[in-house]
Amino acid sequence: MIVLERSNFGIAKNKLVSGALLLTLSTILLKITGLIYKIPMLSILGAEGMGYFNSAYELYTLIVSAATAGLPVSLSVLLSDALAKGDAERARKIDRTALFLCFFAGTIGSLLLAFFAKTFARMIGSPGALYSILSICPTLFFSCISAAYRGSFQGRSKMAPTALSQLAEALLKLFFGLLFASLFQKNGMSVEKCAAGAGFGLSLGSALTCFGLALAKKRTSFIKGRPLAKRSGETSQILRDLARISLPITLGVTLTGATRILDMAMILRRLQSIGMDASAANRVYGGYTTLALSVFGLLPSLVNSISLPLVPLLSAAAATGDREREEELVHEGFRLIALFAIPGAIGITAFSEEILSFLFSGQTEAVSLAAPLLSCLGISSFLSCMIGGIQSILHARKIVIRPLLIMLFGALVKSVSAYVLIGNPNIAILGAPASTFLCNLFVTILGLSLVLKNGYREPRARVFFLPLLSSAGSIALVCLLFQPILRSVLSQKLLFVCELFLFAILYFGLSFLSGSLKKTDFLPGGLLHLQKSAKNAAK
């Protein structure tokens, strides 16, 4: 029987920190790869072609979320519960049931996307996106299967397969996406078909990643053993448990995806309603999504690296009734979120133009359009990070209905505010990031109040105040002390790199001095300790 003892809380903290560190490093590399992908892709397709590709990708994201969004979380929760109680037989059955569900969902979702591709393209006001939508259909199937494999590893607090597979998938998509788009362009195909070439690259990369995850799972011990014993009604109970947790989460994520689709259609149509033609509106939308939203999405992705290991650890603590351990894990989660999100949000807001100019050099027009939009999104990125952490805490406690209602309210706020603001010629596209901020603000406030109502203590003020103080001090030192000296001797690009490096060094130094960053966060033996502790936890 696996017993989660109070004396082993240090092990759980190390699992959270080391798992978060591994996924964070992977996510940084993943996002760098994504940006590397978009820079040459923007040169090949232009803002218009990226608009077609991004439109198709948003539809893919919506359907894949509807198919699998809640399943990895529910799989992680149920597996950690079963293993915490020592029921390895049930854990294996949960694995197989989830894989079957993902196979079924992926098949139906891919067929649905292909069959209604033309209808979807008309609905969003971008008929040129039809070929991109069709080319991306196979990606959905393979992504669903991969989600089941990753959820299985995460439920056992094995974050390496998730981290490595995501990075491998990004690299494969980068290679094949650029290859096909470039080949289509060299053969004189239209911009719509060149955008579809990038979609073919995504499908091939997803297929190879899914195959790699299947091989990795076959080599692990947790799927081996004697044939599964038949327990009356257990499979149906597992299906009910998976549905009870995953369906509300899926609805919430699907709602978020549907909101993005509505935003896409609304932005394109509302921009045309204030005088832009369809091509100009698509260029504006392509610049907003390819440049501003790409950088904006970095921070929430990093926080997801904290949320993934937090869910099974909290779920296991709740399964054994260890309330003190839950409280400390929640505190650690908020501390790590603040440590990453606050300096990132401030940096994005303060250096939006420098960031985009560095990443997308040569795209002067697109950068000048996207820089103020990214600056407006800066504070929203911190709120998105908080939302991710809050939802992980609630999902680990199997609280899924009320977060869904909160997301519904946030979607309503976003849609109404976006419609009003974008339709004002004096605001136009700036209404898109403004509506995102209003939505995230309301969802964060309501979500945090729900966490407190479920008995958790309010996050300590110093958890947020100290990173804020360290961030402000670091930016002030860089701008007032170092920038005037470096500006006279360095080019614009080198100046930005030096400023970023100095900001990071100063921030981590001040964070150590203030106590918000701890020496134990970077123990070199953290991952080894995690592996050994899993073997020695049985009594």
Image (cartoon, rainbow, N blue to C red):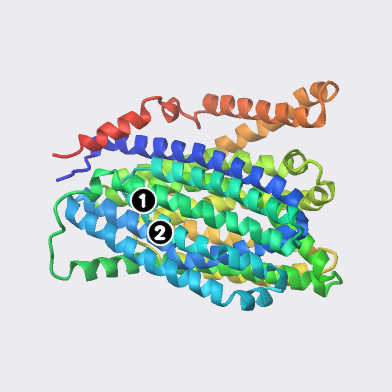
Identify the residue shown where x is 39% and y is 47%.
310
Identify the residue shown where x is 78% and y is 26%.
483
For residue 417, say whether it is visible: no
* In the rendered image, the vertical position of residue 232 relative to residue 450, given as above or below: below
For residue 356, say whether it is visible: yes
Disc 1: CA contacts within 10 A as few (<14), some (14-19) or many (>=20): few
Q: What secondary structure is found at the residue carrying circle 1?
A: helix
* Residue on which disc 2 sits: 145
* Residue on which disc 1 sits: 214
Q: Quadrant of residue 90?
A: bottom left
Q: Amino acid at mark 1?
A: Ala
- Sequence-wise, the earlier of marks 1 and 2 is 2
**Between residues 391 and 120, which one lies in front from this camera angle?**
120
Q: x and y percent of residue 44 in the render?
A: 74, 51
**Between residues 510 and 427, which one lies in front from this camera angle?**
427
Is 366 on the left or on the right of 467, as rendered? right
Q: Quadrant of residue 443?
A: bottom right
Is 281 on the left or on the right of 81, as rendered? right
Is 88 on the left or on the right of 530, as rendered? left
Q: What secondary structure is found at the residue carrying circle 2?
A: helix
Q: x and y percent of residue 261 in the render?
A: 62, 69
Q: Are marks 1 and 2 in contact (CB under 8 Å)?
A: yes
Q: Quadrant of residue 277?
A: bottom right
* In the rendered image, the vertical position of residue 2 relative to residue 120, given as above or below: above
**Between residues 308 and 229, which one lies in front from this camera angle?**
229
